[in-house]
């Protein structure tokens, strides 16, 4: 069984080598690594060329990161699809093997784990840890979501529910997981360990303005799926992150 890992890049020369290395060193070898580059102006593609494990590379103008992810999903041929950002890394060489073990159960549609935030200049300095915990639909109504970089799905899921909604600029990953797990009620499995290290400075958390936009988009994610959140669902979502700082 093959897994396709999609990495969207744009002027990612400072970090993409770490991402590529983390994929290249996986013990599970049936990996199709797809790079979707947004016509970078730095030496991102030169770095990518140094990694012969990369199966497919396209470089062209796109309409943002979620559009790039959608293009990558369209190129994927593996039974399972993962999204790994160009400044994120798998925590060790066993991550993909453990994830693919979960998909040996044919009833499983998705798998997810935990995530560590690390300093942008030091992958070994953990600033907070996102412990997902087991899944229930009820949790989404209390502001819960799994970390998207640790969210793996069968390719058939994209065929069934669609790809990322590019009208959302920072919450398309949230909307996609809400669609998969709540609207369509597909079956996930929780892998209770950290799978991904993510550098701090994400798009939805970069400033108060971005956070307010993310809140608006989170509400829109529910509306797009004809779902009604509780009045406290959206405010609880960022507040849950406070507890992540208590876990290192």
Image (tube, rainbow, N blue to C red):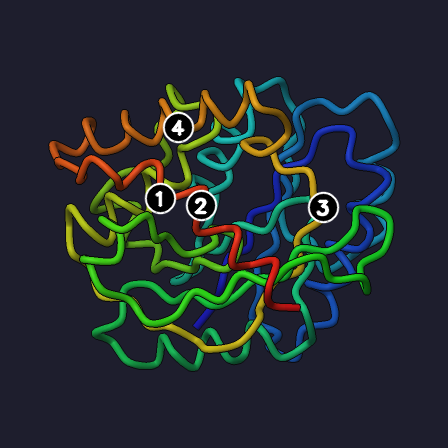
Q: Nearer the viewer, residue 208 or 225?
A: 208
Q: Which residue is mark 4?
A: 215
**Pointers 4 and 2 in contact (C-beta within 8 Å):** no
The numbered mark at residue 236 is 1
Where residue 40 appears, x then y in whole percent?
76, 24
Mark toward the start of the polypeptide (3 vs 4): 3
Mark toward the start of the polypeptide (4 vs 1): 4
**Pointers 1 and 2 in contact (C-beta within 8 Å):** yes
> At numbered mark 4, what does the secondary structure look like: helix, strand or loop?
helix
Where residue 45 appears, x then y in whole percent?
80, 36
Q: Which residue is mark 2?
A: 239
The image shows a total of numbered marks equal to 4
Taking the spot 37% from the left edge, 58% from the top edge, the residue there is 153
Taking the spot 40% from the left edge, 23% from the top edge, the residue there is 168
Label 1 vs label 3, nearer the camera: 1
Q: Nearer the viewer, residue 57 or 123?
A: 123
Q: Is residue 11 left or right of residue 140?
A: right
Q: CA distance from mark 1 to mark 2?
A: 5 Å
Q: CA distance from mark 4 to mark 2?
A: 12 Å
Taking the spot 51% from the left edge, 80% from the top edge, the residue there is 98
Q: Residues within 10 Å of mark 1 (few under 14, many from 20)?
A: some
**Pointers 1 and 3 in contact (C-beta within 8 Å):** no
The image quadrant that residue 230 belongs to is top left
Q: Which residue is mark 3?
A: 87
**Pointers 3 and 4 in contact (C-beta within 8 Å):** no
């Amino acid at each position: 069984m093959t897994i396709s890992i999609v990495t969207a890049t744009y002027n990612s020369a400072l970090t993409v080598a770490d991402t590529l290395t983390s994929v290249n060193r996986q013990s599970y070898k049936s990996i199709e690594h797809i790079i979707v580059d947004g016509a970078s102006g730095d030496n991102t593609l030169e770095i990518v060329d140094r990694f012969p494990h990369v199966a497919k590379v396209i470089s062209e103008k796109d309409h943002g990161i979620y559009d790039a992810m959608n293009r990558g999903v369209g190129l994927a041929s593996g039974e399972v699809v993962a999204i790994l950002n160009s400044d994120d890394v798998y925590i060790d060489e066993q991550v993909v093997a453990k994830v693919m073990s979960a998909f040996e159960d044919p009833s499983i549609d998705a798998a997810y784990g935990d995530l560590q935030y690390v300093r942008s200049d030091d992958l070994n300095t953990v600033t907070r840890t996102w412990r997902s915990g087991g899944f229930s639909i009820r949790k989404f109504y209390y502001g819960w979501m799994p970390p998207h970089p640790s969210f793996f799905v069968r390719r058939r899921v994209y065929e069934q529910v669609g790809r990322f909604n590019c009208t959302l600029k920072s919450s398309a990953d949230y909307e996609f997981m809400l669609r998969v797990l709540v609207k369509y009620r597909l079956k996930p499995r929780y892998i209770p360990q950290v799978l991904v290290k993510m550098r701090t400075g994400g798009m939805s958390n970069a400033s108060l303005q971005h956070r307010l936009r993310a809140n608006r988009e989170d509400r829109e994610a529910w509306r797009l799926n004809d779902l009604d959140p509780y009045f406290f669902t959206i405010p609880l979502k960022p507040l849950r992150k406070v507890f992540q700082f208590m876990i290192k």
